Image: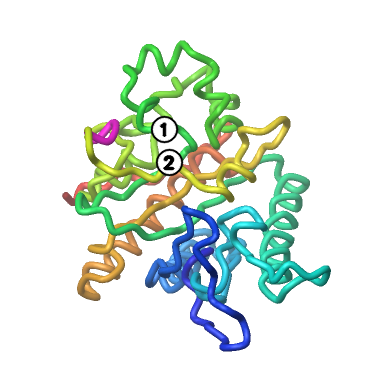
Amino acid sequence: MPHGGHLFPDYIPDRKQTFPSVVKSNDINTQEIGRELAELITEKFKGRKPYIIINHLGRSKLDVNRPLKEGAESDGSNFPSDTQIAWSDYHTFLNNAVEEIEERFGRGLLIDIHGHGHPENYIELGYVLSSEVLTLPNDIINSDPKISDGSSIRSLYNRKQTTLSFAELLRGKTASLGGRLQSYGYETIPSHVHEYPLVNEKYFHGGYSVQKYGSRHGEQVIDAIQAELPRLLRLGNKEIRDQFVKDFAESLSWFVKEYYWEGGQGSKRLTMDMPERN
């Protein structure tokens, strides 16, 4: 959770508009949702806990989902600033978790939780594939290896390509994370219902962390998905948010059991029933 920090110390100056892409507003309630998700997922995996990495500084002070120079502005001195140290600490924790999972399991999944204010209120799942790529028909997406190779779930596809097409993993009704969330009634892009953003619809395809740590690079085996949550699910009434967190935890647990859990790789495959509620 990179953008849900609650600390705004006066001794750390606010970020300037040095870079055109500077955004200082927090993704409200993403830290809270992430913590609740971790608790529910731990229950579903009988005490096995996911790694949790949180940036506690508010986004007006630090953005860890940007390169160091952009996210942690310095005063130009030769000594690292507080924000540069915090940026480095965050990514050290993240890199250590990635390396440990690679060593212990040989595969894994990073979920980078964000919030957006786009009027369509879609859940936007980012695989580092642009809106233009998502508009391509499935046969082209499946036949062009550059598309799957450039995605942040390349490793997953390479493991499953004999049984599933890339388009199915990306937006299939029963095979994708988007399809799972859509089956609960949450409008999700990409999914079998919303395969791609329409003209003039905004869509976040995956930022710095998903691009850096996802399996699109070299021999990396950790996949990454950026989960952009709309205001409706983050700031709406508590009943809606609580139900969403439960459904999101179930969807993520299903996805992990289906594609990463040891029982999901062979005859002892673990599955969870598809939801019926719309």
The reply to whether residue 262 is in sight is no
Q: What residue type is labelled 2?
A: His
Q: Do the residues labelled 1 and 2 touch (CB within 8 Å)?
A: yes
Q: What residue type is labelled 1?
A: Ser
Q: Mark 2 points at which residue?
A: 205
Identify the residue shown where x is 59% and y is 61%: 71
The reply to whether residue 171 is in sight is yes
Give the image quarter of residue 156. top right
Q: Does the magenta stretch include residue 195?
A: yes
- Secondary structure beneath dot 2 equals loop
Colouring convention used in this rendered image of the protein: rainbow
Label 1 and label 2: CA atoms lie apart by 6 Å
Residue 137 as seen in the image, left or right of residue 87: left
Question: Residue 29 location in percent, x, y?
Answer: 38, 72
Q: Which of 189 and 202 is in front in this view?
A: 202
Does 201 appear above or below 228? above
Q: Nearer the viewer, residue 32 or 263?
A: 32
Q: Name the residue under label 1.
A: 130
Question: Residue 192 location in percent, x, y?
Answer: 27, 32
Residue 265 as seen in the image, left or right of residue 136: right
Q: Which contiguous range is marked in magenta?
A: 194-198
Residue 24 as seen in the image, left or right of residue 48: left
Mark 1 is surrounded, within 10 Å at the Cα level, by few (under 14), some (14 to 19) or many (20 or more) other residues, namely: some
Question: Residue 169 location in percent, x, y?
Answer: 43, 30
Identify the residue shown where x is 45% and y is 44%: 255
Which mark is first along the chain, 2 or 1? 1
Mark 2 is surrounded, within 10 Å at the Cα level, by few (under 14), some (14 to 19) or many (20 or more) other residues, namely: many
